[in-house]
Image: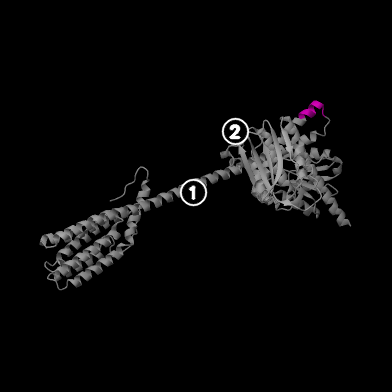
Amino acid sequence: MYSSATATEPEDIELKVLVDQAKAFDSSLVVGRIGSCLVCLLAAWIFRHSPNHVHVFAWLGLQILFNVVSPYYGLKPGRNKANANNARWRLRAVTISSLIGGLLWVAGVVLMWTPGNFELQLMVIFIIFGMSSVSLHALNAHLPAFYCFFVPCVTSVPLVTLWYSDEFSTIVVFAFTFFLTLNTLLALKMHEGLVTSIRKHYVAAELATELQKQKDIAEAAVHLKSRFLAAASHDLRQPMHALNLYLGGLAYADLSPEAMNILKNARACADSMDKMFSALLDLSQLDASVVEPKFNTFPLASLFNKIWVEFDNQAQAKGLVLRVAPCSAYVRADLHLLENILRNFVSNALRYTQRGKVLLGCRRCADGLRIAVYDTGIGIDAEEQDKIFEEYYQVGNRQRDSARGLGLGLAIVQRQAKIMGTAITVVSTPGRGSMFSITVPVSREAVEEMRLENPMPEVHDDNLQGALIAIVDDEELILNASRLLLSQWGCTVLTANSGAAMLAQLANTARPPDLIICDHRLHDTVTGMDVISRLRHEFNSDIPALLLTGDTSPDKVKLLMSMGLPVLHKPLQEHALHAAVQKLLNTGQADANQENC
């Protein structure tokens, strides 16, 4: 009986099931044929003295001939292995072969049955029971083949006893009927179990294949999306970087109060964009595993005071109370990472609180000091409390209000906490507020209070007076903006869109540049490192250099960090560029003085 495909099971799976059914006979029928020949030899030896021994020997020869030249196997068993093209034919051949084999055993029973000789009759019954039982295991993979062999074998003995009217014919009929029924039901169960197992295997395999295909498609889509976002991010950072430099240059112009107010608003918009780009960069750096914690011991009160100074005006503007609980503890942590985490906690608390207060405090616990920010804001539903740490997810911002950022803050601080070997805890009740906390080790070591530096250093233009700066970038807008800004700082600026063009300009100067500022990605396959190496080689001097890049993918961040050069990511505010230029020039001057000594 061939299995047919159902509405829910593809035909190719059913065909594979048939192939496996046919393969089941490839491994069992050869042994079965040999076993059948041995049983026939044993039967012929047992009945060698029976009245029909001549016919029994003839029957033996016929059995051996049949088992050797079976139409299923031919003279070379196992040739032409079962496959999708021949599976049905092979199963049909097995069925015909089994029917012939069953009929041959019927003939054997008739020839070996000796009326009045109970011992020989009992031997025939044992042989038939044995052959029938073996067929249950050998042929259950294909029920028609089993029936064609089993039914003739089992029914032959009771029919012969009834034909000869033996005294125990009733018992034999009853016993063989029970045996026939029991083994038929058992064969059905075994067949269903085998076919179901095979079918499940292929369904699972196809499902796994389909899932792998979907996974590959999804991964390809994610990869394509990542490449698109990386390219888009790089391309957006270029004009944004130029805009920041132009806005910085305008700050030195003699503008009217109205124009200065417009400039202030424009710089505020640019600063908002910079914060978004910085968040993406922070995430890339964390994913690239290039951020290493620098543990120091410092008083928590100084950090608390800095955060209060930064956010108190914002709280008052919303009519909120920002309270900072007194704390005398010293902790051991990465100051920059911990500050960023607490700033994010307080910023989010103020953002999502409309009335009431926000509290920043700490409490000792078994693992150290738990620093927590409490608010009386909107709270977070239980099902959202895990989602808030996902990239770009924001509670209550389905309209994607850009003023509320990209939704990367908690994703970043969670990674930062992990780097410090700790974790963030959230407790929140919708409508009643939230608590975000982080636990850090307490230090018993008394140290001098660390000065928390202002992250926005003031610009002092006269520090750069007379410096010769070589700037290489393939974006004309960036070159123009850089020339304008650095010239206002008192620098002599040379700009070029390639290393070769820069070398041509430097050939007319009397001295090497004091600093090289170069974009990392230039035309073709040339990199900023190539240009810097070429310029240094030309002047045989380790000229201070600064790499600028708009690439923020984790792999690129990791590569740039391994180059041994200072790297700044576009877009840059003018104060950040000024600080980097001043630091490198001072470092280069100190190195030169040391060489002269």
Q: Position of residue 110 (x, y in %)?
A: 15, 64
Circle 2 SS class: loop
Label 2 environment density (alpha carbons within 10 Å; few <14, some 14–19, many ≥20): few
Q: Position of residue 74 (x, y in %)?
A: 28, 63
Residue 256 is a magenta residue: yes
Residue 318 quadrant: top right
Pointer 2 or 1: first along the chain: 1
The residue at which mark 1 appears reads as 212
* Mark 2 residue type: Arg
Question: Between residues 259 and 170, which one lies in front from this camera angle?
Answer: 170
For the question of whether residue 518 can be seen, the reply is yes
Span of residues in magenta = 255-262
Question: Between residues 114 and 182, which one lies in front from this camera angle?
Answer: 182
Tell me the quadrant of the picture where the C terminus can be found: bottom right
Q: State left or right for residue 549 relative to residue 186.
A: right
Q: Is residue 527 above or below residue 254?
A: below
Circle 1 SS class: helix
Label 1 environment density (alpha carbons within 10 Å; few <14, some 14–19, many ≥20): few
Q: Position of residue 127 (x, y in %)?
A: 22, 66
Q: State left or right for residue 113 relative to residue 385.
A: left
Q: Main secondary structure of the magenta part?
A: helix
- Res. 398 mark: 2
Tell me which residue sits at (66%, 40%) in the image: 235
Q: Is residue 579 above or below residue 79?
A: above
Q: Position of residue 292 (x, y in %)?
A: 70, 52
Residue 374 is a magenta residue: no
